[in-house]
Image (cartoon, helix red, strand yellow):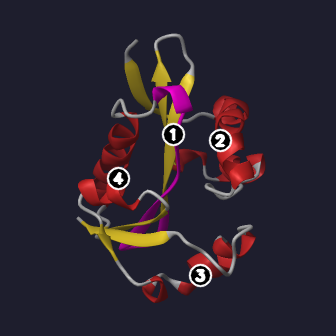
Amino acid sequence: MKIELIKARLSDIENMQRLVSPEVESGVILIRSSDEIATNIRSYILAKEDDGEIVGFCALHIHASSLAEIRSLIVKENKRDKGIGESLVLKALDEAKALGLQKVLSLTYKQSFFEKLGFVEIPKESIPEHKIWADCIKCKHFPVCNEVSLIKTL
C-alpha cells in the first residue's frame, strides 16, 4: 500500500483518537481532547493508506515566532519501522522551514529516532516555561519525567 501524507481534517479526529489511545493510556503520548485537536487541526499531518486508513500522524505546534514542536507522533504498531514516522517528521520540518521557524523541539522517549533526523539533546531547563505549564503539567508522569528534550536548528 502507498502512504500519502496529508493535512488532517476535522472528520479525522475520531480515528486519530482511536489510533493514539493505547499510547496515551501507557503515558507515552500526552492526552489531547478532541476539542483541543479540533482547535489545532491545521497543525496535524496524517499518514494515510490508499484505503483511507490513518496509520500515523504528528503535529507541528508553534510556540513562538522562532520555535515549534513536533508532538503527538504516532505510527500504528504494525506499520512501524517502515519510514512512516520519519516521513511525518520530515514533512513537519519542511513546513516549519516554509513558515520561517528557526528551531523545532521534541520531547520524546525515542531519542535515537530524532537524533537520526538531526535533533540534538538539550537540557529540559531550556524548554520554554509556557510549554511546561500548558502541556507537561497534564502528564501522568509530571513532575518526574524521563522524556528527553531535543532540538533541531533549521
Nearest the viewer among 69 and 21 is: 21
Marks 2 and 1 close (CB-CB < 8 Å): yes
Mark 2: which amino acid?
A: Val
Q: How many numbered circles does the render carry?
A: 4
Q: Residues within 10 Å of mark 3 (few under 14, many from 20)?
A: few
- At 52% from the left and 26% from the top, the residue drawn is 78
Disc 1 to disc 3, C-alpha distance: 24 Å
| Helix, strand or loop for disc 3 | helix
Q: Does the magenta stretch mainly form a helix, a strand or a loop?
A: strand
x, y percent for residue 16: 65, 36
Q: Magenta region: which residues?
A: 62-79
* Circles 2, 4 touching at the beta carbon (< 8 Å): no
Q: Which of the 4 image quadrants contains residue 116? A: bottom left
> Looking at numbered disc 4 in the image, what kind of residue is underneath it?
Phe
Q: Which mark is residue 87?
A: none
Q: Which residue is mark 4?
A: 113
* Along the viewing direction, whichever of 91 and 84 lies nearer the viewer: 84
Q: Which residue is mark 1?
A: 57
